[in-house]
Image (tube, grey):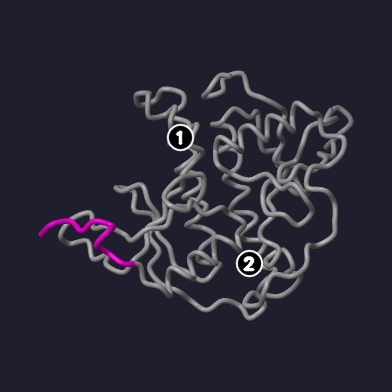
Amino acid sequence: MSTPTTSRVRLDPVLADRVMDAQHLAGLPIAHGGHGPGVHVRPAEPLNDDDACRGLIALHWLPSRRLAAAAATEQHRQPAHYAQQLVVNTVQHALTVLLPHLGTTAARAFQLWEVRVTAAVPLPHELTGLPGPRPSGPQPIASGIRPDVTTAVRRSAALAGLPVATHPGDPGITLRPCPPLDVDDDTAGIADLGWNPSRRLAAATSGTAWNLRTAVEDAVRQALPVALGACGLDVWWRRPDGLPPQLRAYGPSEDPPIRR
């Protein structure tokens, strides 16, 4: 039995629509035409004769073309190659966590380095409408963040293929002030990183939709320190007792995978 190619296997249109909608809800970019950055959506291909995957959808995270090109010239465990592996692995793990909250079931296929989407499930009615108006609120990059921190976040996010929010309500990484935890904790100018989902999901303020929004934001935020750290950002969690965790970005790291 020969292995089918993607050109001979069609996507289930209902499942494909749900997958695309889930990515938009989460605020993640789609890699159209198979070129990154973003989520590449294609038909799943069988690993062997016993792999009944016809009709399923495979998702791959494609980082920036710059990181992919640098990784292609390196051997295993060299900086850019290793950074690409970390980015792909951690973002695809986030996909397996957030997709079940957004109307699909998903599982990792580690032999193929992909996420497989197997079925569509109903969405909460609060999320079935059109996107609302751009919400008002704080700027996604707060004043007082040091310029070198902002630049380092932007550069590492660009390498990883993750967006940085530009306007209030835009999907992407946000940079908020980082409150000190005690009198000796100097946080001046550093950022607490967060994630904005789509406007449609961000409009959820209560009920099931609010729980989904929180789950999606947490799933992507958990991926940020590995993905951005692999791409040259000095970023660490601080988890104080009784307070929300802080994902602190301090600036560029000493060992970026690609040197300018």
* Left or right of residue 231: residue 137: right
* Left or right of residue 42: residue 210: right
Q: Position of residue 168 (x, y in %)?
A: 79, 54
Q: Position of residue 213 (x, y in %)?
A: 66, 64
Q: Are marks 2 and 1 in contact (CB under 8 Å)?
A: no
For label 2, the residue is 212
Q: Looking at the picture, does residue 220 appear above or below residue 143?
A: below
Residue at the extreme right: 183
Q: Looking at the picture, does residue 125 appear above or below residue 51?
A: below
| Residue name at image x 68 percent, y 44 percent | 164
- Residue type for callout 2: Leu
For label 1, the residue is 84
Q: Looking at the picture, does residue 65 appear above or below residue 19?
A: above
**Badge number at residue 75:** none
Task: Specify start and end residues of the magenta stretch as a single range.
Answer: 1-10
- Residue type for callout 1: Gln
